[in-house]
Image (cartoon, helix red, strand yellow):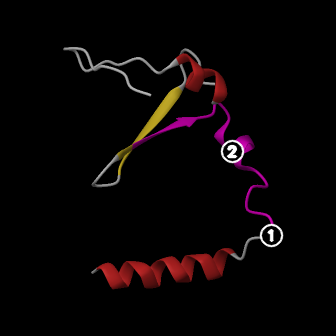
């Protein structure tokens, strides 16, 4: 999908994406610059409720340590 940026830096989020991700008027979008690309992430009205329980069963400490090792390799 594509959209055009106006002179004022505005663009339109395609309707199919707005509906799929429940993006509505007044909602906050987080813009993440990865260096090569830009990611746009909708922030739910109640972000805490939206993420509650999503990490169940994950070994978070192991994941954190692995990511730190990967970061050291990029330095």
Residue drawn at the location 19% of the way across and 14% of the way down: 7
Q: Quadrant of residue 38?
A: top left
Disc 2 packing (10 Å; few <14; some 14–19; many ≥20): few
Q: Does the segment drawn in magenta span residue 47?
A: yes
Residue drawn at the location 55% of the way across and 14% of the way down: 25
Q: Quadrant of the N terminus?
A: top left
The number of discs equals 2
Q: Would residue 30 be found to the left or right of residue 21 on screen?
A: left
Q: Would residue 51 be found to the left or right of residue 8 on screen?
A: right
User: Which type of secondary structure does the marked residue at label 1 adopt?
Assistant: loop
Q: Position of residue 37 (x, y in %)?
A: 33, 48
Identify whether 27 is placed above or below 43.
above
Q: Which residue is mark 2?
A: 48
Front residue of this view, candidates 3 and 29: 3
Q: Are marks 2 and 1 in contact (CB under 8 Å)?
A: no
Identify whether 19 is placed above or below 48.
above
For the residues carrying marks 2 and 1, which lies nearer the camera in this image?
1
Q: Position of residue 48 (x, y in %)?
A: 69, 44
Gap in angstroms between the C-alphas marked 2 and 1:
18 Å
Disc 1 packing (10 Å; few <14; some 14–19; many ≥20): few
Q: Of marks 2 and 1, which one's residue comes earlier in the chain? A: 2
Q: Quadrant of the C terminus?
A: bottom left
Identify whether 39 is placed above or below 22.
below
Q: In the image, which residues are magenta? A: 39-56
Q: Which residue is mark 1?
A: 57
Q: Does the segment drawn in magenta span residue 31?
A: no
User: Which type of secondary structure does the marked residue at label 2 adopt?
Assistant: helix
Q: Position of residue 26 (x, y in %)?
A: 53, 17
Q: Position of residue 51 (x, y in %)?
A: 70, 48
Residue drawn at the location 49% of the way across and 77% of the way down: 67
Q: Quadrant of residue 22?
A: top right
Residue drawn at the location 71% of the way across and 42% of the way down: 50
């Amino acid at each position: 999908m594509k959209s055009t940026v106006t002179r004022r830096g505005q663009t339109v989020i395609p309707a199919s994406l707005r509906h799929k991700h429940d993006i509505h008027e007044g909602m906050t979008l987080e813009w993440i610059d990865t260096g090569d690309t830009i990611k746009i992430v909708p922030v739910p009205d109640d972000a805490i409720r939206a993420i509650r329980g999503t990490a169940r069963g994950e070994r978070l400490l192991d994941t954190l340590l692995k990511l730190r090792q990967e970061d050291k390799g990029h330095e």
